[in-house]
Amino acid sequence: MESEFRRVAKGKGGDNGGGSGGPGALWFLMAGSLLFLLVLSQTVFIVPAGTVAVITTLGRVTGSPRGAGPNFKLPLLQNTHRFNVKTQVRPERFGSLTKDLQVIEATATVKYALRPQEVGRVYAEIATLDGDVYPRIVQPSLLKALKSVFSRYDLVTIASQWGSISEEVEQQVDTELSRFGYVDVQGLDLTGLQIAEEYRAAIEEKQIAEQRLQRAQTEVRIAEEEAKKFQTLSQSLDEQVLYKLFLDKWDGNTSVVPSFPGSQSVPVIVDAQP
């Protein structure tokens, strides 16, 4: 009886040991699936539209920037760094001295876009984060161009030629940034000019005086043109032409008809009756 009991107990123990292999295989399968998903997540990455990704291998930029869509990289060895290449619009409030040492304040709104093919060079040389592109690349060149342009004009000229100066600043910014080739300037607007109140009246008076001067110069030119026309006409008319013009216009009722030019005859009196 005792040996039979031991045999039955041993059999039950063997059944339990065989049954424990089922859960172990399941856990192994789950662990393998998780590992596969982890490796896949480190291998495949998605680049959103309007951005490009820089690939670094152990900290060094490798290959060309990756465009929008699914991309692949080596897990654990490579990392991705995304940069926005869409048009950015950034307002910049600034202050500057004019040629006559007056302080002005305004807002420069610059439109620019990072060049996709230069993103790798940007990461390697100047900015490892997308948020560093404006303060490290665009802003310094923008402020330099603003101060360079405004220092060449006096306050009155700046106030009266605001539009043309805005175009000049845009060209200067584009020239500054073209030296490095990181970004493209797509536009620049200057708004919100602020100057000291005591200079506003002087600027308005100068503008009024310039308008009056232009009006007077226009009137002088018109008078000169009329004088030239009259002089030309008077030189082209001789006595015979004037006599012909008189006869063409004579209505037959004029009392005195002038004598023919060059003749010794006296003027003809027509219908001298009172």
Image: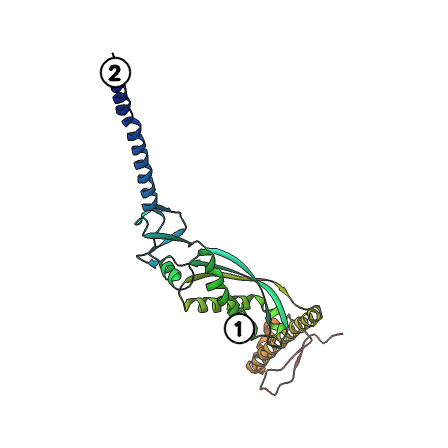
Q: Is residue 129 above or below residue 250?
A: above
Q: Are marks 2 and 1 in contact (CB under 8 Å)?
A: no
160 and 84: which is toward the camera: 84
On the question of residue 243 being in view, the answer is: no
Residue highlighted by disc 2: 8
Circle 1 crowding by C-alpha within 10 Å: few under 14, some 14–19, many from 20: some
Percent position of residue 265, x then y: 62, 85
Compared across the picture, whether 34 is left or right of 201 comes to: left
Residue highlighted by disc 1: 148
Amino acid of disc 1: Ser
What residue is rendered at 58% in x and 67% in y? 162
State which mark lies toward you, 2 or 1: 2
What residue is rendered at 23% in x and 17% in y? 7
Which image quadrant for residue 256?
bottom right
Quick one: quadrant of the N terminus?
top left
Percent position of residue 60, x then y: 33, 59
Number of the label disc, if any, that sits on residue 103: none
Q: Is residue 27 above or below residue 79?
A: above
